């Protein structure tokens, strides 16, 4: 694996911010429990962003960094909504972030980089990452004290009931994340001149964080404007 470029961290923070904001905007409409398929969809979204960040940075540290960043955005969202951190719409998604990050870390640790250069290998990596994450999620009740949502009329967790959807979408989102990371790397090299790029790189991370928080504040306050 190639060495990590420290200049890629601002882009990792940018991706983590996008992921965190996307999770929060969905959470605005979820107060007590997840809608039937939202968790499966957001699993694929998480795998997309985590894969992009890891591929771009070439360090596994990007995975926990993005998980922590997304969790902080979720906590900020809870504060704006006046929700306790132990609320099911806050604590359980944060647990899901950590399980998705752990699942991806396991897959990239035990899979061949040569295999992942092939599109079928990338699709299978997405499949196994999603399968691992959705099977770990029911453990949430031991971490937060809040049981996972179940399919109506059953005791079957939604994460397992809709696992095929998460798997199918993740088979697409994993290779999509790798493709986006390559595009971002190419854009960085071509668009930023040697003179301007140091300043731009320094601004990317704080600008991403400020913009992300501003979006949440504006979105929550929009009906009052």
Image (spheres, grey):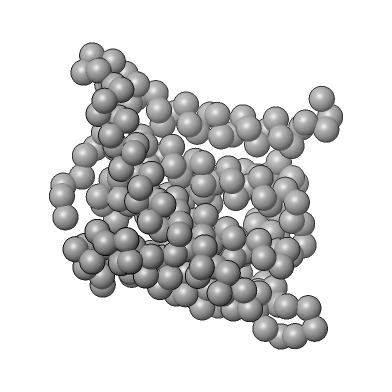
- Indicate whether 2 appears above or below 102: above
Outermost residue on the left side: it is 2
* Residue found at x 40% / y 73%: 128
- Which quadrant, please, contains the C terminus? top right
The residue at the point 16 percent across, 47 percent down is 3
Does 30 sit left or right of 127 as displayed? right
Q: Say if residue 88 shows up in the picture.
A: no
The furthest residue to the top: 195
Q: Relative to 33, does residue 10 appear above or below in the rendering?
A: above
Residue 41 placement, left or right of 53: right
Q: Position of residue 68 (x, y in %)?
A: 46, 51
Q: Nearer the viewer, residue 47 or 92?
A: 47
Name the residue nearer the viewer: 112 or 81. Answer: 112
Residue 117 lies in quadrant = bottom left
Q: Quadrant of the N terminus?
A: bottom left
Instruction: Give the image location of residue 207, x and y in percent.
Output: 47, 26
Residue at image location 23% in from the left, 66% down from the top: 115
Quadrant housing residue 165 = bottom right
- In the displayed structure image, the side of residue 172 where residue 196 appears, left or right: left
Residue 44 in sight: yes
Total marks placed: 0
- As displayed, is residue 202 above or below residue 105? above
The location of residue 168, given as percent across then percent down, is: 51, 68
Identify the residue at horizontal 78%, vertical 78% (top origin).
152
Q: Position of residue 191 (x, y in %)?
A: 30, 22
59 and 130: which is toward the camera = 130
Judge left or right: residue 43 versus residue 11. right
């Amino acid at each position: 694996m190639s060495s990590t470029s420290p200049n890629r961290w601002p882009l990792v923070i940018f991706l983590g911010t996008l992921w965190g904001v996307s999770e929060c905007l969905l959470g605005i409409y979820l107060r007590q429990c997840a809608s039937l398929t939202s968790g499966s969809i957001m699993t694929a979204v998480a795998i997309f962003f985590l894969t992009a960040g890891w591929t771009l940075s070439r360090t596994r540290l990007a995975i926990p960094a993005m998980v922590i960043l997304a969790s902080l955005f979720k906590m900020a969202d809870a504060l704006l909504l006046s929700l306790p951190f132990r609320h099911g719409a806050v604590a359980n998604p944060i647990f899901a972030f950590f399980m998705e990050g752990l699942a991806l870390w396991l897959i990239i640790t035990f899979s061949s980089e040569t295999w992942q250069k092939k599109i079928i290998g990338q699709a299978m990596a997405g499949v196994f990452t999603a399968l691992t994450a959705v099977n770990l999620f029911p453990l949430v009740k031991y971490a937060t004290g809040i049981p996972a949502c179940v399919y109506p009329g059953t005791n079957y967790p939604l994460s397992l009931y809709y696992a095929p959807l998460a798997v199918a979408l993740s088979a697409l989102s994993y290779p999509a994340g790798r493709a986006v990371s390559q595009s971002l790397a190419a854009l960085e090299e071509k668009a930023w001149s040697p003179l301007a790029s140091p300043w731009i790189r320094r601004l990317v991370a704080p600008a991403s964080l400020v913009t992300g928080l501003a979006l949440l504040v504006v979105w929550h306050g929009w009906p009052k404007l």
